[in-house]
Each structure stands twice: as structure tokens, then as C-alpha cells.
Amino acid sequence: MQQTRKHILEILKEQKEATIDEIVTSLTDRIGKITAVTVRHHLEILRGDGLVAAPAVRRRSAPGRPQYVYTLTDRAADYFPNNYQGLATGLIDQIKEQLPSDKVGDILSGVAEQMAAEAMIPDAPIHIRLDHAVAYLNKNGYSAAWHVNGNGRHILTISNCPYEQVSSVNPELCKMDRRLIEGLINVPVTRTTCQLEDEYEACTYVINIT
């Protein structure tokens, strides 16, 4: 990302919200003199990228022209350092250490069921349910797609695991994914390939329609 836009994201992260003039002041302290026109240009690019929200009116305690402030979107959080993987790994390790395996499975199944319920996929023909399931999975970091193979079987593929570093040492999460898919489409599935275990390019699930 262009350096000035990185600085703008950092300023909004630190200040929570800022006007054009406030951003200009902070940028001038960091990189030297910059104009409001240039800042607006960078903000529009960041808005187009989904990282900065549309400006909102700041409440004023005295009469005067309204001030418009800019804030970060939730998506912008991905541009700052985090340790989600480390936290998730630590939590799962502690759960597995303190609970029997069947209880761990129950917890992960509960997570899958909650995610599937939140997706609110309609009770519709299987191809519509699969379309909704793929959209939900892609929105949550999976790279999913489905097709009908030469034998007329519905096949769902996932080529990216959003928590690959965690699942590589916690295969229980692969079972959670299977339960999630079954919950999304309300049909049993059989996993035939796995990226982690078999070094395939994707995890493949056969939809067991009776």
C-alpha cells in the first residue's frame, strides 16, 4: 500500500476519528507539508478499498459549519498486526488439555452449528442452498465453489482454509468444517480429499443427496 495511505490508516486507528484538517496536521508532523486536496484523494481511494467509512457529521457544542469525520471500517483491522492464530491455537490447546476428546468435539460441533444458523440459508433446492453456502464460506475467508461432476454428483471444493496454521496442528477443526458444511446445506457430506492430510490442492466434499 502507498505510504501516505498507510499513515492515514494509522492516524485513524490512533485517533478513532479525524477530520480532513486533523489528518493534514498529523500527516504534516510525520511526512512534511501536505494539502487537504491530497488527503481527500487518498481518503477516497481508501473508501473505495473498503478501509475507510463514509464521513459522518461530528456533533458540535457551538454553532458553526458541520465538521465531517472519517473512521476505519471493520475490514481495516486486517491491516494492523494481530495474533489471532496464536490466540486460537492457545485456546484450543487448553480446551484439549482440560476436557476429554468427546467434549472437545461437542464444543467444535456447537461452533459449527452456530455459524450455520447465523448464515440463515433458506430451505430451497440443493443448488440454491449450495450457492448460499459458497457465498457464506467465501465471505468468511474460505475459497469455495461447487459443481456437478460427470456422474451427476454435487461436489463442493474449498481451496483456502482461513485458519490453516491452527488446523494444521488441530485436525479437529477439519471435522468442524465438515459439520459446518452439513449445517449450511442440511445434507450429509463426505470429504474425499484434504489439503492438510493428503497435500491436495483443495478439500473436496461429495454432497450425499438421497
Image (spheres, rainbow, N blue to C red):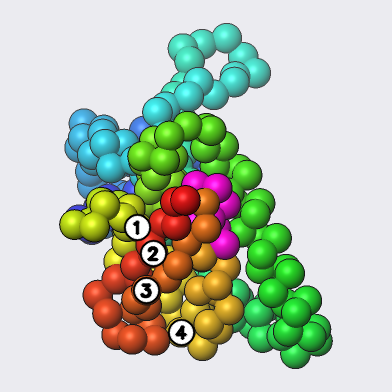
Q: Which mark is residue 156?
A: 1
Q: How many marks?
A: 4
Indicate which disc residue 205 carries.
2
- Mark 3 falls on what kind of element? strand
Residue 148 in picture, x, y percent from top left: 25, 51
Marks 1 and 3, the one that precedes in the sequence: 1
Q: Which residues are magenta?
A: 179-186
The residue at 43%/46% (across/down) is 133
Q: State how far apart marks 4 and 2 are (Cα).
A: 19 Å
Q: Quadrant of residue 80?
A: bottom left
Say which residue label 3 marks.
Answer: 192
Instruction: Measure the alpha-carbon separation of dots 4 and 3.
Output: 18 Å
Q: Earlier in the sequence, mark 1 or mark 2?
A: 1
Q: Residue at x 63, y 44 (%)?
A: 117
Looking at this view, is 97 or 78 the one in front?
97
The relative height of residue 26 versus residue 19 in the rendered view (above or below) is below
From the viewer's perspective, is residue 15 above or below residue 45? below
Number of the label disc, if any, that sits on residue 72:
none
Amino acid identity at mark 2: Tyr
Instruction: Please say if the residues under marks 2 and 3 sit with CB atoms less than 8 Å apart.
Output: yes
Instruction: Give how far apart the Cα atoms at labels 1 and 4 are.
Output: 21 Å
- Disc 4 vs disc 3: which is toward the camera? 3
